[in-house]
Amino acid sequence: MDEAQAALRQLLEHCMFPRRAEALALLDLQPGLLNLRWAGAGFVVNGKWAYPSTTVLMMAGQGGDLGLVLALLERGADLHARDDVDWTALIAAAWWARTPEVCELLLSRGVDLMAESINGNTALTLYGNGSRLTTAEKEAGRKRLREAWASGPHPSQVQCRRDENWARRWPFVQVLVLGGFQPLAARRALLQQTALPPDVALPRLPCATAAERLGLVRAKVWSHPGIWRAIAAFL
């Protein structure tokens, strides 16, 4: 392990406990660690997982220290980085969430609420699963996440969210326009609610263009009589 990776390992551990003062002091000495990716094998600290390619912001999201996450964002931490299982900082924060504040902060800076992990999960589907929250607490937290995303971007992120992520703002837009980005659980729920025949199922098309996805939706979903009821259920 080289010196940079050894220092990063120490920084990741500071973020996971969390130990804010120690983490920021180490970053002051080695600012290049901020967006460096972990190149070693996965490891566990304080009951939390660090996967290969993880970053400091992802671990701070798991640690749940709002002040530390804010400090990292102000220093230029990459919101959209993903580890080897496609977790973002938001997904990590949502999994370990005890309160939604860290997730709301990340959402206010422009992170995509509907970004999927390698297993097709999102911050909404995984919210609170690592913290043993009650069903009511999870639902309340998810509601706050949806509201935070719907309220619009932080002023510094307006331009960032004029890209395709902005078009994903509402789940029903994903169904009607993007198709292939709808999370697996939501796609299944959509099919159940509309009682669509199997040939109407929306397949995952990671290599398809936006035009191809739109064509699929128009051909198989747009004209279905139950689609508007399904849309209303997602609002």
Image (cartoon, rainbow, N blue to C red):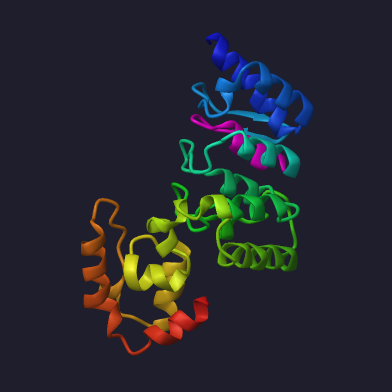
Please say whether residue 34 is one of the residues in the magenta stretch: no
> Quick check: can you spot residue 182?
no
Q: Looking at this view, is 166 or 98 the one in front? A: 166
User: Is residue 14 found left or right of 125 in the rendered image?
Assistant: right
Q: Looking at this view, is 74 or 198 the one in front? A: 74
In this view, 94 is above or below 49 = below
Which residue shows up at 68% across the image and 67% down it? 139
Image quadrant of residue 107?
bottom right
In this view, 190 is above or below 13 = below
> Quick check: can you spot residue 37?
yes
User: Is residue 213 found left or right of 1 in the rendered image?
Assistant: left
Which stretch appears magenta? 50-65
Image quadrant of residue 50?
top right
Which residue shows up at 68% across the image and 55% down it? 128
In this view, 99 is above or below 88 = below
Which residue shows up at 53% across the image and 32% down it? 54
Please say whether residue 59 is one of the residues in the magenta stretch: yes
Measured from the top left, where is residue 223 in percent x and y? 27, 85
User: Is residue 185 found left or right of 10 in the rendered image?
Assistant: left
In this view, 29 is above or below 197 = above
Q: Looking at this view, is 102 or 228 the one in front? A: 102
* Residue closest to the far bottom: 225
Which residue shows up at 40% across the image and 71% down it? 173
* Residue closest to the far top: 2
Tally of numbered tags? 0
Measured from the top left, where is residue 140 in percent x and y? 71, 67
Measured from the top left, where is residue 4 in percent x and y? 55, 14
